[in-house]
C-alpha cells in the first residue's frame, strides 16, 4: 500500500506516529511562509503542514501544488496549536508535519467546486460526474447505498433465501413501459429486450422449486423521466412459495428495520400501519399517502346537498362530490395566499376551489350567504371546524376531487412546516383494484400487472364487471413515496387465461407473448408471491432526497443521456450491417 492510514482516521491516539497519507489537495493556505494543505480522501480530511524551518524541500514543492493534485505526504503526527483545533473534523485535533511529499498526479483547474456548500448545476455535475462524486456528501451517499445493499443481503440470507441472477437479454413482453431493444446479430429481424423487471423469471423460479429467491436486480424501462425515475434502476426483487400476504408484510418490515438501522442508525417502528386502497383515496386523495401530518379529506356532499350555491348543486346533480379539507389554524391565510391555493387547485385539474374561514364560531366567506344556518352548523360539525380553521372545498368527479385535495394537503403541510424531515413513516396500502379503465385507449388494463391473483370472493365479477374485482396486491409507502409493490401471483393457468381475456389478449396473443410462463404453470405451480422494493428510492429517502440521481453513481439526465460518456451515441456502418439495420431514415428526418 502507498499509504499507512486514511485521511479520516488519525487522532490524539496517533501523536508522534510516523505516517504516510495519500489523497487530493482540497485546499491550500499560505500563512506567513508556512503552508497548510487539507488533504482529502473518501474517509475525511487531514491537515498537512509544510514548514520551511522544519524542511525546505517539501515546502518548495507545496508552493506549486494546485487544487485536486493527487499527492503522497510522509511525516509525524503532532497536536494542533492552541486555538487551531477544528471540532468539526474527526482529525481536527491533530496535523501532519510533512517530511516528504510526492506528486502522484497533477490536475487542471476543476470546472466545478469539490465542495458540498457550492453545488454546480445539473448539466455540469453529470458531465464531470467523477468530480461531483469526490464531494464528501456524494461519497456519503454511495457509502449509505453500500451499507443498505449489505444489510439487504445479510437479512435475506439469514432467512434462507437464495440470491439468483436472471437474464439481461430477454423476450420482449408488455409490462407497462417501452422495452429497450437489443437487435440480434445472429438472427436478423429479431431482437432481445432488456428486462423491465425479472417478473416472469422469478415466477418460473418458484415453479422450479426455488422457494425463496432474491436479487438486487437491474431493471430497464424506456419511459418519460422524472426525479424518481431513471432508464436503469435497481430493485430488491423477492419471491416466495407457499405464503400469504402476512408473510410478505412480516419479511419486508424486518428487512426495512435492518436496512435503516445498519445504513443510517434509524430505528424503524414495526408493525407498519395498514390501509386499504379505497380508504387511502377517501382519506388522503392518493394511493400513496404521506401520514406524517393530518388534513384528511372529508366527503361533505351530504352536509351541503341542500345549499343554494349553484356550483355545488350542479356537481351533485351530475353525481359528483363535494370534498373538503379542514386546514387547522389556517384562517389567517391572506387573500393572496388563498388565490395561490386556487391557482394550484386549477393547475391540478380542478375547475376551482371554494373556501370558508371559521371566526367567532361562524363561517365567513363570499359564498356563505348561499348556505342556511342549519347547513353551516351541520358542515362545521361534519368538519370538526373550530375558530381559526380554514375549510377548502373541491366540487367535481370523485377521482378529480380526491387527486386535487390530495396534492393541496401536501402543499399546505409544506407551507406550514408540518412535515418532519427526520421521520420515516411506513404504510401498507392493500386491496387495490385488479383492473382500471384506460380512457385514452378505451380498454380495460391491469392496475398492477396481469399476473396478480384476484381476490377469490370477487371472481364472480371478473367477466361481467371487472372494475369491481380487487387484487391480492400491496404497496409499501414511505413518507408519501411508493417504495415497494408486490402481489400474490396467479398460479392457476385457466384463471390466468381468463384475466388475459378480460384485458383484451386473445389466446393466440397470450401464447405468443407469455407462452413460456403459461406452459410452465401447467407443470405444478406452487402458490407464490413477492415484492420489489425500489432500492434507489429507499436510499434516496434515507439520504433526504426524492431525486434518485443523488444516490446513483452514473445517472442519466432528463433526456436519458449521459453527458459524461456521450451515450446514446451513433454506431458505425459496420455494426449496423452486422445487425441488419439501417438508420438512414432517422438521419434524414
Image: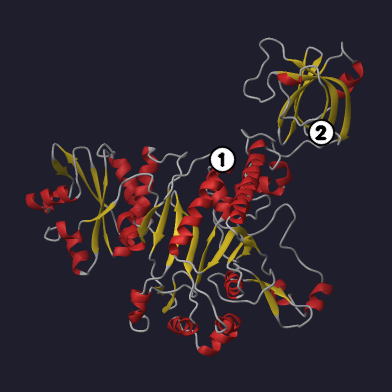
Q: Considering the numbered disc 2 on the image, is that residue within a helix, a strand or a loop? A: loop
Give residue 69's mark: 2
Q: Nearer the viewer, residue 357 or 100?
A: 100
Quarter holding the C terminus is bottom right
Q: Quadrant of residue 307?
A: bottom left
User: In the rendered view, would you say 225 is above or below 461?
Assistant: above
Please name which of the two marks, 1 or 2, marks the residue nearer to the observer.
1
In the picture, measured across the screen, residue 529 lies left or right of residue 388, that is right
Give residue 264's mark: 1
For the point 78% across and 12% down, the residue is 32
User: In the rendered view, would you say 286 is above or below 61?
Assistant: below
Neighbour tally class for label 1: few under 14, some 14-19, many 20 plus, Cα within 10 Å: some
In the picture, measured across the screen, residue 405 lies left or right of residue 504, that is left
Asked which colour scheme the image uses, the reply is secondary structure
Q: Earlier in the sequence, mark 1 or mark 2?
A: 2
Q: Nearer the viewer, residue 441 or 196?
A: 196
Amino acid at each position: 500500500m502507498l499509504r499507512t492510514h486514511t485521511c479520516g482516521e488519525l487522532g490524539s491516539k496517533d501523536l508522534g506516529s510516523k505516517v504516510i497519507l495519500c489523497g487530493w489537495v482540497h485546499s491550500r493556505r499560505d500563512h506567513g511562509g508556512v503552508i497548510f494543505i487539507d488533504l482529502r480522501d473518501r474517509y475525511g480530511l487531514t491537515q498537512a503542514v509544510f514548514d520551511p524551518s522544519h524542511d525546505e524541500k517539501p515546502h518548495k514543492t507545496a508552493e506549486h501544488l494546485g487544487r485536486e493534485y493527487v499527492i503522497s505526504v510522509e511525516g509525524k503526527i503532532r497536536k494542533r496549536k492552541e486555538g487551531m483545533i477544528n471540532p468539526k473534523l474527526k482529525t481536527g485535533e491533530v496535523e501532519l508535519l510533512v517530511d516528504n511529499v510526492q506528486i502522484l498526479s497533477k490536475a487542471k483547474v476543476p470546472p466545478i467546486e469539490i465542495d458540498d456548500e457550492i453545488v454546480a448545476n445539473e448539466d455540469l455535475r453529470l458531465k464531470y460526474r467523477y468530480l461531483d462524486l469526490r464531494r464528501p456528501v456524494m461519497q456519503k451517499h454511495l457509502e449509505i447505498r453500500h451499507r443498505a445493499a449489505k444489510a439487504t443481503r445479510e437479512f435475506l440470507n439469514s432467512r434462507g433465501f437464495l440470491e439468483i441472477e436472471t437474464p439481461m437479454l430477454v423476450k420482449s413482453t408488455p409490462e407497462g413501459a417501452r422495452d429497450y431493444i437489443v437487435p440480434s446479430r445472429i438472427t436478423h429481424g429479431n431482437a432481445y429486450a432488456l428486462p423491465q423487471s425479472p417478473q416472469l423469471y422469478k415466477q418460473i423460479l418458484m415453479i422450479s422449486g426455488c422457494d425463496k429467491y432474491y436479487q438486487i436486480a437491474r431493471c430497464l424501462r424506456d419511459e418519460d423521466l422524472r426525479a424518481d425515475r431513471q432508464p436503469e434502476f435497481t430493485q430488491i426483487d423477492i419471491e416466495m412459495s407457499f405464503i400469504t400476504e402476512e408473510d410478505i408484510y412480516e419479511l419486508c418490515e424486518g428487512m426495512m428495520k435492518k436496512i435503516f438501522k445498519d445504513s443510517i442508525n434509524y430505528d424503524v417502528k414495526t408493525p407498519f400501519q395498514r390501509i386499504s386502497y379505497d380508504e387511502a383515496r377517501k382519506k388522503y386523495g392518493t394511493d400513496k399517502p404521506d401520514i406524517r401530518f393530518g388534513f384528511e379529506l372529508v366527503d361533505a356532499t351530504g352536509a351541503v346537498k341542500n345549499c343554494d350555491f349553484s356550483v355545488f348543486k350542479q356537481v351533485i346533480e351530475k353525481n359528483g362530490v363535494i370534498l373538503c379539507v379542514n386546514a387547522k389554524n389556517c384562517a389567517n391565510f391572506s387573500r393572496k395566499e388563498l388565490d395561490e391555493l386556487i391557482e394550484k387547485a386549477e393547475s391540478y385539474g380542478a375547475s376551482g376551489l371554494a373556501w370558508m374561514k371559521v371566526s367567532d364560531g361562524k363561517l365567513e366567506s363570499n359564498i356563505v350567504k348561499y348556505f342556511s344556518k342549519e347547513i353551516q352548523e351541520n358542515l362545521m360539525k361534519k368538519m370538526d371546524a373550530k375558530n381559526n380553521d380554514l375549510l377548502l372545498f373541491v366540487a367535481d368527479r370523485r377521482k378529480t376531487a380526491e387527486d386535487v385535495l390530495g396534492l393541496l394537503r401536501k402543499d399546505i403541510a409544506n407551507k406550514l412546516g408540518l412535515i418532519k424531515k427526520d421521520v420515516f413513516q411506513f404504510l401498507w396500502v392493500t386491496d387495490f383494484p385488479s383492473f382500471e379503465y384506460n380512457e385514452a385507449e378505451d380498454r380495460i388494463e391491469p392496475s398492477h400487472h396481469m399476473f396478480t391473483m384476484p381476490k377469490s370472493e370477487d371472481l364472480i365479477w371478473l367477466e361481467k364487471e371487472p372494475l369491481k374485482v380487487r387484487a391480492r396486491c400491496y404497496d409499501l409507502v414511505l413518507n408519501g413515496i411508493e417504495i415497494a409493490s408486490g402481489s400474490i401471483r396467479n398460479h392457476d393457468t385457466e384463471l390466468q387465461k381468463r384475466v388475459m381475456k378480460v384485458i383484451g389478449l386473445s389466446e393466440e396473443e397470450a401464447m405468443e407473448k407469455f407462452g413460456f410462463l403459461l406452459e410452465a404453470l401447467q407443470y405444478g405451480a406452487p402458490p407464490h408471491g413477492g415484492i420489489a422494493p425500489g432500492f434507489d428510492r429507499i436510499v434516496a429517502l434515507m439520504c433526504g432526497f426524492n431525486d434518485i440521481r443523488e444516490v446513483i453513481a452514473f445517472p442519466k439526465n432528463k433526456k436519458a443521456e449521459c453527458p459524461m460518456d456521450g451515450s446514446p451515441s451513433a454506431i458505425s456502418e459496420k455494426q449496423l450491417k452486422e445487425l441488419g439495420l439501417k438508420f438512414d431514415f432517422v438521419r434524414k428526418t
